[in-house]
């Protein structure tokens, strides 16, 4: 019986072999670049020495984790990372939805395409160029923001030199850069809503706001919940490049996050310590996994869409 099922399965797979060929490349990518490197995660529990290799290095248990937890910068780094992540999530999550809902009701095709192009384009700017733009716009002497403020008699402000402004600059520049690209998914979800619902609502005299609230939002709620779960699962994955490039000695108090700390202490210092860096990275990923599981469980319990 088992053999017959296996033969039937092979025959069914042979009928659509093209699909399995297409699936083979991304599957191989995940295995090679996501699962195989997990083998090296064990150096977080060892005193890794390159000449001895992973297996030859001595086992030290949780000593690298303990070192990080007892570091005098631990609470400041975690506070900065969590605050910036939460700020980014709260500020960045609703705007793609609002943009998608607005574009969905634009009747003039040319204007709609113009708005889409203007909002999508910043996404393709590299991080280095993006930070360069931020420096130019916020420059204390020639930055356009300070020039405009000077017209109204306001003294120039060194925006990137003040630690309290770092998080807002980081988050809102990111919202501007990614809002257009992020709304593509919501526009696709809105396109899948049955037009008959809108037609019936118009006949009943519903305004556009009521149609958004009672038809569009419930229609895109499942995909919004899934994206929210994924975003929460990446809470501590803020990104190294942008934060590092925006840092300077004046704003370091609020700009130092886990990723930049790992680079400076574990990799860029005179005593390179791969094990310490790996321990911090593993701790960060463990927190992300816990958040993902908790939020997914909560969404499932509330009867909403979930990852599994």
Image: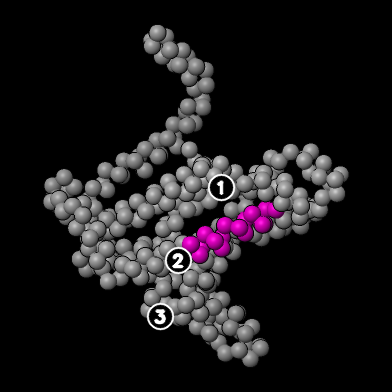
Please give the residue where the numbered disc 1 appears in the rendered image.
Answer: 225
Of the image marks 2 and 3, the number of the one nearer the N terminus: 2
Q: What's the residue at 18%, 47% (across, down)?
A: 54
Q: Are marks 2 and 1 in contact (CB under 8 Å)?
A: no
Q: What's the residue at 42%, 57% (across, down)?
A: 237
Magenta residues, start to end: 86-101
Marks 3, 1: nearer the viewer: 1
Of the image marks 3 and 1, the number of the one nearer the N terminus: 1
Q: Is residue 248 visible?
A: no
Please give the residue where the numbered disc 3 appears in the rendered image.
Answer: 250
Depicted 107 relative to depicted 306: above or below:
below
Depicted 20 relative to depicted 249: above or below:
above
Depicted 212 relative to depicted 158: above or below:
above
Please give the residue where the numbered disc 2 appears in the rendered image.
Answer: 83
- Which quadrant is home to the N terminus? top left
Q: Answer left or right for 108 relative to 296.
A: right
Instruction: Please tell me whether the stretch drawn in magenta is mainly helix, strand or loop.
Output: helix
Q: What's the residue at 60%, 80% (across, down)?
A: 145
What element does badge 1 sit on? helix
Name the foreground residue: 172 vs 73: 73
Q: Position of residue 299 (x, y in %)?
A: 52, 45
């Amino acid at each position: 019986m088992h053999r017959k099922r296996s033969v039937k399965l092979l025959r069914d797979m042979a009928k659509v072999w093209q699909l399995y060929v297409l699936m083979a490349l991304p599957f191989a990518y995940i295995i090679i670049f996501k699962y195989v490197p997990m083998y090296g995660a064990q150096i977080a529990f060892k005193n890794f020495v390159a000449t001895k290799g992973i297996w030859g290095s001595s086992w030290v248990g949780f000593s690298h984790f303990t070192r990080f937890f007892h570091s005098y910068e631990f609470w400041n780094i975690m506070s900065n990372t969590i605050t910036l992540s939460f700020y980014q999530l709260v500020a960045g999550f609703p705007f793609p939805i609002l943009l998608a809902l607005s574009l969905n009701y634009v009747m003039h095709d040319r204007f709609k395409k113009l708005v889409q192009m203007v909002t999508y384009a910043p996404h393709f700017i590299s991080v280095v160029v993006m930070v360069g733009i931020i420096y130019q716009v916020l420059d204390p002497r020639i930055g356009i923001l300070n020039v405009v403020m000077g017209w109204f008699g306001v003294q120039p402000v060194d925006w990137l030199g003040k630690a309290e402004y770092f998080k807002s600059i980081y988050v809102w520049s990111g919202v501007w850069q990614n809002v257009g690209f992020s709304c593509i998914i919501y526009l696709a979800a809105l396109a899948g809503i049955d037009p008959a619902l809108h037609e019936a609502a118009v006949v009943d005299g519903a305004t556009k706001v009521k149609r958004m609230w009672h038809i569009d939002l419930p229609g895109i709620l499942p995909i919004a919940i899934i994206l929210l779960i994924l975003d929460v699962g990446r809470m501590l994955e803020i990104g190294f490049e942008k934060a590092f490039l925006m840092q300077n000695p004046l704003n370091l108090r609020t700009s130092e996050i886990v990723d930049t700390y790992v680079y400076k202490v574990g990799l860029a210092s005179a005593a390179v310590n791969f094990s310490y860096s790996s321990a911090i990275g593993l701790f960060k990923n463990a927190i992300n996994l816990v958040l993902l599981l908790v939020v997914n469980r909560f969404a499932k319990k509330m009867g909403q869409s979930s990852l599994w």
